[in-house]
Image: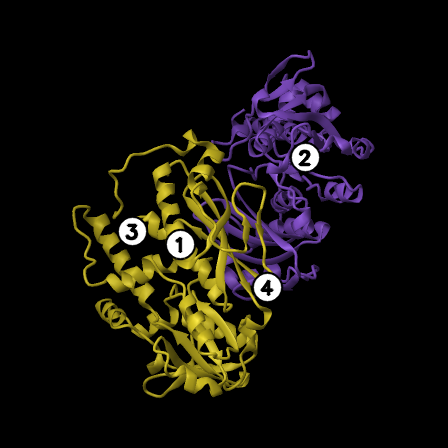
Chain colours: A purple, B yellow
């Protein structure tokens, strides 16, 4: 509903597959020294120069992961790239290259794909990432985007999920729950729009949480800050499914328990305000909202002095032995098992259900 | 129509996303020394040990690239992997790792995904490739498979499309057009089945061409043979869209023309027989059928003596200067511009239209 519908429409089939790829990727200039050959052959060529290569992939499906009623295609392209960049940050690396596969039905014009690519290229430019390959094809219905990201890293710098030790400080970057708050606002305005197409969406004062939903960022800045501060990391991952789910992943893989303090969860005032509007608990947004793309990591207690001066990082708890379980210490000082109701791509989109 | 419909049905949502990934990938054992860490973290870790890393990606969409009416899911999984392996062979490399993203609607049961994964794993086992990551998610309708493949190679061994020189011999491995012949048989039997569901599909005597369509192979064996024979390669790619289209790619990128001899095109007797049944020209199958996954390459004439004893390779023509154009020399010794009507993923599936 927020799309510009006045633009001209060119049919993709008029260009053909190779014409389209040339059109979309012809202006790409490789910026990473490791990108030896990009689009144009059977494969791209990467020169890792002694580093290890990280690879991760994510697929976004229309109607499941995004709703084009309110997600502009340019934002969607940006977000699709960011989601993958975040996986590199989660390993303590910077993203270097992506390949992009897009499938689209004949509902989409050339101009639509151009918008999507504009967002992809904007994200790549902002993060110094090269688009080195891709595939563009038809779908019977809807839009599918599959991105694979590469990152290069020295072996000693890789941070896995399974490296946490008992007594580690559990930390998270930025704030949590805002992307989910933004989604609720968008869903509300969509419902209102469906009921009355003449109404104007009420999005004022929600810029921050809407941007967190529609145009998130990957915390490669935190990776750099942690490195510059010489902070020793034991375990790390990014918060895509919700903090509770991610804490459980790290604990399970590191064979530990955890205590998370509700009052330490970083929640922005705008997220609080939105939770109040919907008569919901902001703690639930932070624990189970998902799509925050913040970094969750554990460090030995000896790193406390270095950490405490980094404003973008909150210490939210500590790891325990496995037998103690994974618990939330509430504001009333009650300890209860942490419930993970993280977003699950395999159920129908929980977010549109709620 | 050839699927086993008697199997039990388990709903995927009963496992959840993480449960499903564990279920599908839990038994994977990494065989490549370069696979340092596979499924289970935010990214997989590859150790290229001084080699260059090749990366390529392909997306297959239901109703566009495959038809589950006649493509069993296990074969589809196998083929989806092979298509990607072939891109590595096309660069003169062996595939080493893949990531697999699958999106499926609730029409698909756990058993269906297991079948798909069985095919993927079979292909990986046959080619010594590791599944190191993936994403499994829902779709609103249909099945989408996106695979990214990695290969490791010494820089000096990489063969691009743009390296052909004037006067090179143009060679192709195996035979051409069989996959297309197989597709025509399958489409015919599907139409007959739709008209009369009680009929038995007539697939006898077509094993070879059906297998070429449903369960193709990637010619990594040719890569090895060419290496063992110490043959100098100037340009190479794989034949996925049809020989004519691929010859044009190599000529365009190498700024050359070409002469291809119709009577040198390798066409299997079964492909000839099928063409006769459909009252079509087998040369068209070879030039424009596509999905052959053979290797097209050019070598300097000095390699002729080494090449002529390799039974799996046919010399089909030579490169010329660009001004001479790209021509087919017919059996009647007439030279005419080579027409490429290669399969184009962005038009409606040509194969089901014909």
Chain hosting mark 2: A
Please name which of the two marks, 3 or 1, marks the residue nearer to the observer.
Answer: 1
Quadrant into which the N terminus of chain A falls: top right
Q: Which residue is mark 1?
A: B125
The reply to whether discs 4 and 3 touch (Cβ–Cβ < 8 Å) is no
Bin the neighbour count of mark 1 within 10 Å (Cα to Cα): few under 14, some 14-19, many 20 and up.
Answer: few
Name the mark on residue A297: 2
The reply to whether discs 4 and 1 touch (Cβ–Cβ < 8 Å) is no
Name the mark on residue B51: 4
- Secondary structure of the residue carrying tag 4 is loop
Chain hosting mark 3: B
Q: What percent of the width, then of the height, locates residue A104? A: 50, 49
Bin the neighbour count of mark 3 within 10 Å (Cα to Cα): few under 14, some 14-19, many 20 and up.
Answer: some
- Kindly report the distance in space between the C-alpha atoms of the residues bearing marks 4 and 2: 32 Å
Please name which of the two marks, 4 or 3, marks the residue nearer to the observer.
Answer: 4
The reply to whether discs 2 and 3 touch (Cβ–Cβ < 8 Å) is no
- Secondary structure of the residue carrying tag 1 is helix
Please name whichever residue, B284 or A201, is drawn nearer the observer in this view of the structure.
Answer: B284
Chain hosting mark 4: B
- Kindly report the distance in space between the C-alpha atoms of the residues bearing marks 1 and 2: 36 Å
Residue found 73% across the figure and 28% down from its top: A315
Q: Which residue is mark 3?
A: B70
- Secondary structure of the residue carrying tag 2 is strand
């Amino acid at each position: 509903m927020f799309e510009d519908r006045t633009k001209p429409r060119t049919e993709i089939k008029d260009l053909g597959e190779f014409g389209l790829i040339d059109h979309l990727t012809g202006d790409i200039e490789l910026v990473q020294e490791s990108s030896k050959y990009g689009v144009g052959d059977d494969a791209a060529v990467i020169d890792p120069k002694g580093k290890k290569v990280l690879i991760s992939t994510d697929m976004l499906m229309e109607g499941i992961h995004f709703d084009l009623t309110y997600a502009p295609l340019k934002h969607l392209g940006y977000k699709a790239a960011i989601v993958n960049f975040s996986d590199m940050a989660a390993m303590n690396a910077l993203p270097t290259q992506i390949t992009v596969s897009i499938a689209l039905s004949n509902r989409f014009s050339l101009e639509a794909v151009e918008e999507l690519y504009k967002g992809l290229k904007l994200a790549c430019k902002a993060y110094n990432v090269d688009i080195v390959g891709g595939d563009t094809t038809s779908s019977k219905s809807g839009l599918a985007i599959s991105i694979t990201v590469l990152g290069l890293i020295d072996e000693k710098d890789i941070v896995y999920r399974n490296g946490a030790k008992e007594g580690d400080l559990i930390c998270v970057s930025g704030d949590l729950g805002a992307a989910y708050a933004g989604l609720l606002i968008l869903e509300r305005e969509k419902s209102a729009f469906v009921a009355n197409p003449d109404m104007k969406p009420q999005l004022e004062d929600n810029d921050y949480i809407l941007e967190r939903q529609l145009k998130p960022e990957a915390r490669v800045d935190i990776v750099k800050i942690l490195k510059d501060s010489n902070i020793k990391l034991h375990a790390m991952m990014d918060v895509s499914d919700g903090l509770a789910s991610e804490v459980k992943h790290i604990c399970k893989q590191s064979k530990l328990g955890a205590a998370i303090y509700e009052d330490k969860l970083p929640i922005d005032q705008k997220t609080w305000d939105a939770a109040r509007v919907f008569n919901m608990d902001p703690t639930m947004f932070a624990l189970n909202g998902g799509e925050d793309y913040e970094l969750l990591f554990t460090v030995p207690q000896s790193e406390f002095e270095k950490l405490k001066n980094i404003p973008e990082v909150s210490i939210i708890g500590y790891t325990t032995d496995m037998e103690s379980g994974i618990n939330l210490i509430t504001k009333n000082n009650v300890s209860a098992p942490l419930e993970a109701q993280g977003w699950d791509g395999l159920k129908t989109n929980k977010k549109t259900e709620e």
